[in-house]
Amino acid sequence: MTSYRPIKTAVFPVAGLGTRFLPATKAIPKEMLTIVDKPLIHYAFEQAQEAGIENFIFITGRNKETISNYFDHAFELQSTLEEKGKNALLSATKDWLPPAGNIAYVRQQEPLGLGHAINCARNFIGDNAFAVILPDEMMVSEKPFLKTMVEFYHANGGNVLGVADCAPEDTDKYGIVDVQSEDGDVIQVKSMVEKPAPADAPSNISITGPYILQPEIFDLLSKSQKGKGGEIQLTDSINTMIQTTKTSGIRFVGKRYDCGSPSGFLQANIACALKRDDMKHDIERMLKEFIV
Ligand code: G1P
């Protein structure tokens, strides 16, 4: 059996301004807004850990320092919790932290698009395949989706993309794939296009992430011209790479929340609260009161 380059590193693009959440994001990164009691970025990070990823690269920008503080020890807080014997809370602050040296932060410096953000990680990834996780997309499924994708990758190689059907009128919100062939939840991708108008869309199968990408993407990203919206698009470079590298889409089976929009973010909060034994009953009661 062929063995493919292992996936040890995940890249998290977190440099965006989060304008849809203003005024909150005037002072707090969007990724630090909470779903119940954990910041959004923590769910993306857990997805990576559950898939066996060991190194984490955050592509950040100005005013994102709270993200690096979050992925670090907080000694005063931790010693106070320890003194008071609040062990569960103490664990919640630190048990999930990776060892020192396994997290890196790279500043994007200029907001030139998702492709440009990912290319900022090129010197730290070198010749390895890697994952890209978009923190806005909160994906809840029985088996962690990236884990499913990594297993598929170890058997098949190539690029692997998370995809999902979207409403036909929403194709202009996503990268959209053209399908070569389809077998159950696995799609062989013929080409892809960033945010086409519904009339021009080759299908209604949207790219949701995560992505597993071969490092050859960096040469293409480095040469890429600006695309849709005047930005360097990841979709454009993957589309070029399809000519030389098999690219598969795995259909996501589960519940997906677009936490890049306030409404999707609220839905994710309610759904996560309903899963919590300590809140479920209160939230159910409240929802019944609202819906008359
Ligand atoms: C990005 C990608 C797009 C993808 C989407 C998923 O767009 O460019 O191809 O479908 O994420 O959320 P953005 O949401 O950053 O505009």
Image (spheres, helix red, strand yellow):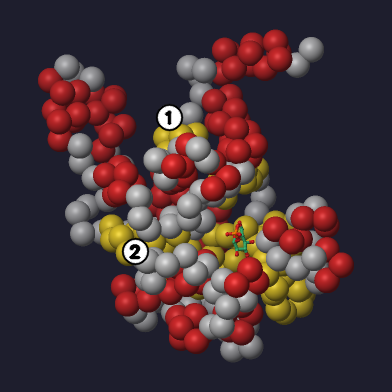
Left or right of 18 on screen, residue 175: right
Q: How many marks?
A: 2
Kindly indicate the quadrant of the structure image that contains residue 262.
top right
Give the residue drawn at x 35%, y 50%: 64
* First in residue order: circle 1 vs circle 2: 1
Residue at 57% from the left image edge and 71% from the top image edge: 231
Q: Badge 1 local density, few (<14 within 10 Å), some, or many (20+)?
A: few
What x and y, as percent, mark residue 113? 52, 67
Quickly name the residue at label 2: 107
The crowding category of the residue bearing disc 2, from other C-alpha atoms within 10 Å (few below 14, some 14 to 19, many at least 20), is some
Which one is nearer the viewer's eye here, 241 or 64? 64
What amino acid does circle 2 point to?
Arg
Q: Secondary structure at mark 1?
A: loop
Classify mark 2: helix, strand or loop: strand
**Amino acid, disc 1:** Asp
The reply, left or right, for residue 194 in relation to residue 133 is right
Residue 246 lies, in percent from the top left, at 61, 81
Residue assigned mark 1: 37
Q: Image point 37% across, 81% down: which residue?
A: 127
Camera-side residue: 130 or 39?
39
Q: Residue furthest bottom?
A: 244
- Vertical position of residue 284 compared to residue 163: above or below: above
Query: Gap between marks 1 and 2, in whole Å?
Result: 27 Å
Q: Residue at x 51, y 48 (%)?
A: 18
Front-lying residue, 256 or 68: 68
Does the image show residue 185?
A: no
Instruction: Please indicate, yes or no, whether residue 104 appears anywhere in the rendered image.
Output: yes
Instruction: Indicate the position of residue 46 as horizontal and vertical percent values.
Output: 42, 47
Q: Please determine whether, in this image, residue 284 is positioned above or below residue 227.
A: above
